[in-house]
C-alpha cells in the first residue's frame, strides 16, 4: 500500500511538473502562430525568449514587482520583434536569414546586457521565485488538486490564452485580417487592409508572448538569469506550431507532450537511472522531431508564409 502511494505521488509530481515545463513553449508557440498566420516566419524566437528572460529578471530584481518584470520582458522581446518586422516587412530581406540574425542578436545581447548590468560576481544575483496560487478547496483535492490547481499565475494565463487566441484569430475582424494577409496579401490589400501594419502587429504580439515565455525560466523555474537559459525552447515552439497545424488547441497538446517528456526524463535522473543523462536530456527534443517527420506532408501552412509582399507588384 505504501509503495502504491509513493508511485501515485511520483506520477502526480511528473504530470504537475510537465504542465509547468510546457508553459514557456506554449506562450512562445501561441505567439509564433499569430505571426505565421500573418505570413511572417520568425526563426528568432529563441533570441526573443532570451531577451524576455533577461528583461523579466532585471525588472523584477530592481523593483521586486513581478508585473513590472513581465512587462519589461514583453518590451525587451517586442523591440527585437520590431527589428524583425523591419527586416522582413519593410526592407523585405529573406525571412529565414532575418530570423537567424535576430536569434543570434538576442542571444548575444541578453548575455552582454546582463554582464554590463551586474558585472562578474562569485554569486549570481537572484529573485524570489514567483509564488504559486493556492486555490482554497481545490488545490487539496486528491490527485487532481496538485495537478491543476497548484501553479503559478503564468500557467493559468498560458492555458487561458489557448481559447483566447483561437477566438482572436477565428472570431474577430482583426483575426480575419491577419488570416487574409497570411493567405492572400494582394486580395487583402485590394480590400483596403494595410498588409504591412497587420504583419507588424502580428510579429510584435508574437514577440511579446515569446518574451513572457522566456521570463518564465528566470522568474518561475530558476530565480536567476543564465546565458542560454531557455535551452532551445524557441526552436521547440517553432516545431509546435507545425505540429499544431497553426491551431491553438493542438499547439497546447504539443506543448504538454514536450513538458511531460521533459518532466519524465528529469524524474528518471532524480531516481538515479543507469541510462546516460545525455540521452535523457535529448528525449524532449527527439519526440517533436519524430512527430514532425510523420506530419510534414500533412501540414497546412498559410499560403503566403515567408513570402514578402510588395504593394502593386504583379
Image (cartoon, helix red, strand yellow):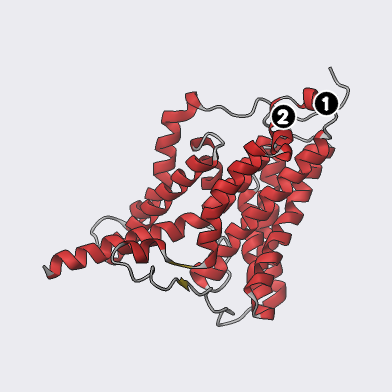
**28 relative to 17, above or below:** above
Q: Can residue 151 be spotted in the picture?
A: yes
Most foreground residue, 308 or 201: 201
**194 relative to 168, above or below:** above
**Tag 1–tag 2 contact (CB < 8 Å):** yes
Q: Can residue 231 be spotted in the picture?
A: no
Mark 2 surroundings: few (<14), some (14-19) or many (≥20) residues within 10 A: many
For marks 1 and 2, give the CA distance: 10 Å
85 left or right of 239?
right
Residue occupied by mark 1: 191
Extreme-top residue of the structure: 314
Image x and y of residue 106, in percent = 68, 56
33 left or right of 291?
right
Mark 1 surroundings: few (<14), some (14-19) or many (≥20) residues within 10 A: few
Residue occupied by mark 2: 180
Numbered mark located on residue 119 in the image:
none
Q: Residue at x 73, y 61 (%)?
A: 75
Q: Secondary structure at mark 2?
A: helix
Quadrant in which residue 36 is drawn:
top right
Q: Residue at x 72, y 45 (%)?
A: 203
Most foreground residue, 155 or 220: 155
Image x and y of residue 152, in percent = 50, 68
Image x and y of residue 125, in percent = 59, 80
Amino acid at each position: 500500500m505504501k509503495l502504491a502511494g509513493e508511485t501515485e505521488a511520483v506520477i502526480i509530481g511528473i504530470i504537475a511538473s510537465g504542465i509547468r515545463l510546457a508553459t514557456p513553449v506554449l506562450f512562445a508557440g501561441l505567439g509564433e502562430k499569430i505571426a505565421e498566420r500573418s505570413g511572417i516566419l520568425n526563426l528568432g524566437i529563441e533570441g526573443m525568449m532570451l531577451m524576455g528572460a533577461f528583461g523579466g529578471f532585471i525588472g523584477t530584481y530592481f523593483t521586486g514587482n513581478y508585473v513590472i518584470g513581465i512587462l519589461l520582458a514583453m518590451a525587451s522581446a517586442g523591440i527585437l520583434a520590431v527589428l524583425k518586422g523591419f527586416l522582413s516587412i519593410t526592407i523585405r530581406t529573406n525571412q529565414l536569414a532575418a530570423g537567424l540574425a535576430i536569434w543570434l542578436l538576442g542571444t548575444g545581447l541578453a548575455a552582454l546586457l546582463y554582464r554590463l548590468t551586474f558585472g562578474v560576481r562569485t554569486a549570481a544575483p537572484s529573485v524570489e521565485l514567483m509564488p504559486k496560487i493556492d486555490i482554497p478547496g481545490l488545490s487539496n483535492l486528491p490527485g487532481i488538486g496538485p495537478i491543476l490547481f497548484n501553479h503559478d499565475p503564468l500557467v493559468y494565463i498560458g492555458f487561458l490564452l489557448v481559447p483566447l487566441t483561437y477566438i482572436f484569430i477565428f472570431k474577430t475582424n482583426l483575426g480575419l485580417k491577419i488570416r487574409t494577409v497570411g493567405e492572400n496579401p494582394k486580395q487583402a490589400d485590394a480590400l483596403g487592409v494595410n498588409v504591412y501594419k497587420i504583419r507588424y502587429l502580428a510579429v510584435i504580439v508574437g514577440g511579446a508572448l515569446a518574451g513572457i515565455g522566456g521570463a518564465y525560466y528566470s522568474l518561475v523555474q530558476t530565480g536567476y538569469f543564465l546565458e542560454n537559459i531557455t535551452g532551445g525552447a524557441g526552436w521547440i515552439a517553432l516545431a509546435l506550431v507545425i505540429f499544431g497545424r497553426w491551431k491553438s488547441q493542438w499547439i497546447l497538446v504539443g506543448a504538454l507532450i514536450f513538458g511531460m517528456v521533459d518532466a519524465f526524463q528529469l524524474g528518471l535522473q532524480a531516481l538515479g537511472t543507469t541510462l546516460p543523462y545525455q540521452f535523457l536530456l535529448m528525449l524532449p527534443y527527439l519526440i517533436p522531431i519524430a512527430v514532425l517527420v510523420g506530419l510534414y506532408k500533412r501540414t497546412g501552412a498559410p499560403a503566403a508564409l515567408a513570402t514578402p509582399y510588395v504593394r502593386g507588384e504583379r
